[in-house]
Amino acid sequence: MKKLQDFMKVVNTLSAEEFAEQFPHPVLFYSERPGAIEDFARTRMVESSGGGRIDRFSRQVLDLVVLLPNPHTNREFPRKILIGRDKQRDFVVSHNTVSARHATLLL
């Protein structure tokens, strides 16, 4: 299940309870194309000719990559989530624009 489109096919078959059971942890999405996420920025879209609503079924959205938690951290899912290129992170993003310890989410 690499792309958001594939993820949504699975999710749409689940009830809310089944979803919570199968995906108890956060699920992140990112684009393999540099700058794609910035294209969604509302503030830049206001003055752009491409402004307006984001089509949730557009290829740009459906091609986002699903990033599930790293199952090899050997610990309970933390209140502090580490994201980075290092294989020990909670969410591993294997991309040369991502540092080993790129970001932290506090829940």
Image: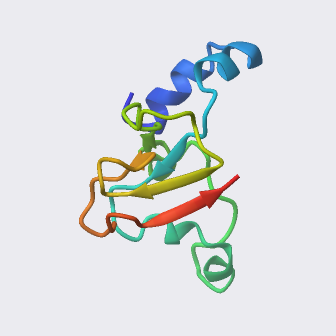
Query: Total marks drawn?
Result: 0
Hey, which residue is sitting farthest bottom in the picture? 47
Q: Position of residue 7 (x, y in %)?
A: 49, 29
Q: Position of residue 67 (x, y in %)?
A: 44, 42
Hey, which residue is sitting farthest right in the picture? 16
Image side of residue 1 versus residue 27, left or right? left
Q: Nearer the viewer, residue 44 or 102?
A: 102
On screen, residue 100 above or below 29:
below
Query: What residue is drawn where x is 51% and y is 72%?
Result: 38
On screen, residue 10 above or below 86:
above
Q: Position of residue 20 (x, y in %)?
A: 69, 22
On screen, residue 51 above or below 69:
below
The colour scheme is rainbow
Q: Position of residue 37 (x, y in %)?
A: 49, 64
Query: What residue is drawn where x is 42% and y is 33%?
Result: 74
Q: Nearer the viewer, residue 79 or 49?
A: 79
Q: Quadrant of the N terminus?
A: top left
| Corner quadrant of residue 52 | bottom right
Query: What residue is drawn where x is 71% and y is 52%?
Result: 107
Query: What residue is drawn where x is 51% and y is 70%?
Result: 39
Hey, which residue is sitting farthest left in the picture? 96
